[in-house]
Image (cartoon, helix red, strand yellow):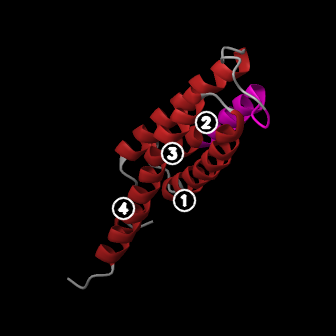
């Protein structure tokens, strides 16, 4: 692979670190829900153990994407976009369910983290677009 093609696939490590942060918050949320430390104010369709499993799955996916970015893998950009998109979808589903029966802290967590994860995706998409347009310029 030529250095130009290799550079085209690189993702800023700061995005990877942001993804690590997102995955870490999900690990904490999953632990809280699965350990039963949530207040008793929730009602169906919200189920703390289901939320914990979903958070763990999304967190593992984001951790995988972050690992690919931090390793500067040739799959970094694709993995980061795929796992971040998956996380956004999961957060949207979670927010929908949580607003119907979850506690206020759960709703607040979703409302805080969803824009952060969306920002990660926007950065990834904008970075890729600007790198592609730079590589296509005639010197």
Give the mark, 1 or 3, whose residue is nearer the N terminus. Answer: 1
Mark 3 Cα shell of 10 Å, populated few (<14), some (14-19), many (≥20):
many
Q: Residue at x 52, y 46 (%)?
A: 68
Residue 8 in view, yes or no: no
Quick check: 42 above or below 57?
Answer: above
Magenta stretch prevailing secondary structure: helix
Between label 2 and label 1, give the one nearer the viewer: 2
* Quarter occupied by the N terminus: bottom left
Instruction: Name the mark nearer the viewer: 1 or 3.
Output: 3
| Residue nearest the observer in this picture, 51 or 125 | 51
Residue marked by disc 1: 78
Circle 2 Cα neighbour tier, 10 Å, few/some/many (<14 / 14–19 / ≥20): many
Which residue lies at the image location 47% right of the left edge and 52% below the top edge? Answer: 118
Q: Which residue in the structure is indicated by mark 2?
A: 59
- Residue that numbered label 3 is attached to: 114
| Cα distance between the residues tagged 4 and 1 | 14 Å
Residue corresponding to mark 4: 7
Label 3 or label 4, whichever lies nearer to me, is: 3
- Find the magenta span and give its range: 44-61
Question: What percent of the width, then of the height, locates residue 74?
Answer: 50, 56
Q: Residue at x 57, y 23 (%)?
A: 28
On whether residue 57 falls in the magenta region, the answer is yes
How far apart marks 4 and 2 lie (CA) works out to 27 Å
Element class at badge 2: helix
């Amino acid at each position: 692979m030529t250095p130009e093609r290799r550079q085209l696939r690189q993702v800023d490590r700061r995005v990877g670190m942001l993804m690590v942060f997102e995955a870490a918050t999900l690990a904490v949320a999953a632990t809280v829900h699965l350990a039963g430390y949530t207040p008793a104010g929730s009602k169906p369709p919200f189920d703390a153990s289901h939320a914990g499993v979903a958070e763990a799955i999304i967190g593992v996916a984001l951790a995988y994407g972050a690992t690919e970015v931090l390793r500067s893998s040739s799959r970094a950009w694709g993995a980061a976009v795929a796992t971040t998109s998956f996380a956004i979808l999961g957060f949207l589903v979670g927010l929908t369910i949580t607003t119907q029966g979850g506690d206020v802290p759960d709703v607040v967590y979703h409302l805080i983290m969803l824009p952060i994860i969306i920002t990660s995706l926007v950065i990834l998409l904008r970075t890729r677009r600007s790198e592609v347009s730079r590589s296509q310029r005639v010197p």
